Image (cartoon, helix red, strand yellow):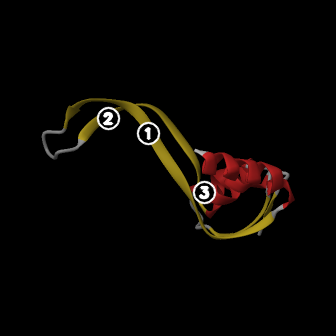
Amino acid sequence: MENISNTIALIEAGSNRKHLLVVGDVMLDKYIHGAVERISPEAPVPVVLALRRSQSAGGAANAAMNIVGLNGRATLIAFAADGDFHNVQAADLAGSQQMILW
């Protein structure tokens, strides 16, 4: 537990001075939240009653957002296909004061 406390203290003390470069692929993570009441008779998979759907940035975008969440600064250089991530998340990431998009 002492190591975790020391690590957290180091992150909080110095993270606002760091500017990190994050390079990689970005994607959109999609989640379905719901209830399972039975197993499908055709295959051994749960049948989900979808109550809510959510999505968030994944891959390198998630790493960059975590850096910003720790009061750091991030420059994100990434590859994204013309799909869901490009259409939904790029505007959200660009609105961050601590992140530069390329």
Residue tagged by mark 2?
Answer: 48
Estimate the spatial distance between the alpha carbons at disc 1 and disc 3, rounded to whole Å: 17 Å
Residue 32's tag is 1
User: Closer to the N terminus: mark 2 or mark 1?
Assistant: 1
Q: Position of residue 49 (x, y in %)?
A: 34, 30
The residue at the point 62 percent across, 46 percent down is: 2
Quadrant housing residue 16:
bottom right
Tell me if residue 48 comes above or below residue 64 in the rendering: above
User: Closer to the N terminus: mark 1 or mark 3?
Assistant: 1
Q: Position of residue 30 (x, y in %)?
A: 49, 48
The residue at the point 64 percent across, 59 percent down is: 63
Residue tagged by mark 3?
Answer: 85
Q: Position of 4 compared to 35: left or right?
A: right
Amino acid type for the residue under numbered disc 3: Phe
Picture quarter with the N terminus = top right
Amino acid type for the residue under numbered disc 2: Val
Tell me if residue 60 comes above or below residue 95 in the rendering: below
